[in-house]
Image: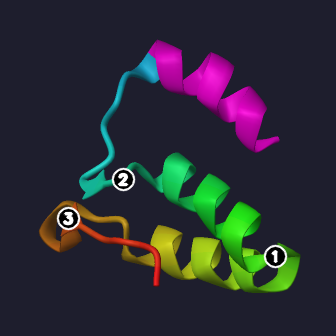
Amino acid sequence: MLRYYQNNISKKIGNRCVFDPSCSRYSELAFREKGFFKGMVLTIDRLKRCRPENGGVDKLN
């Protein structure tokens, strides 16, 4: 599902993420480095914070 978003939807709407790395890239890294459960928790937390006033560099911990 993440790959579909990155390859299809994101390209159509453009890169509008206020974070670096983008939310989809962050999610990809979270799942790869932390596993399914922790990756899901980190992704949900990130998406809840994804607003213009919260932007900036947000590295995966």
Q: Secondary structure at mark 1?
A: loop
From mark 2 to mark 3, how far is it between C-alphas? 10 Å
Marks 2 and 1: in contact by CB < 8 Å? no
Q: Say whether residue 27 is left or right of residue 10.
A: right
- Is the residue 45 above or below the residue 7 in the image? below
Instruction: Using the image, determine if residue 7 lies above or below residue 45.
Output: above
Local SS, label 2 = loop
Instruction: Answer with mark 1 or mark 2, whichever residue precedes in sequence.
Output: 2
**Nearer to us: label 2 or label 3:** 2
**Label 2 crowd bin: few (<14), some (14–19), many (20+), radius 10 Å:** some
- Say if the magenta span includes residue 42: no
Please tell me whether residue 11 is drawn above or below residue 3 in the rendered image: above
Q: At 68% from the left edge and 84% from the top edge, which residue is drawn? A: 41
Amino acid bearing label 3: Gly
Q: Nearer the viewer, residue 18 or 33?
A: 33
Q: Amino acid at mark 2?
A: Pro
Q: Which residue is mark 1?
A: 35
Label 1: how many Cα within 10 Å (few below 14, some 14–19, many 20+): few
Mark 1 in CB contact with mark 3 (< 8 angstroms):
no
* Residue 46 percent location from the top left of the image: 48, 73
Q: Which residue is mark 2?
A: 21
Q: Which residues are magenta?
A: 1-12
Q: Say the numbered circle drawn on residue 55.
A: 3
Quadrant in the picture for residue 8: top right
Asked if residue 22 lies left or right of residue 34, the reply is left
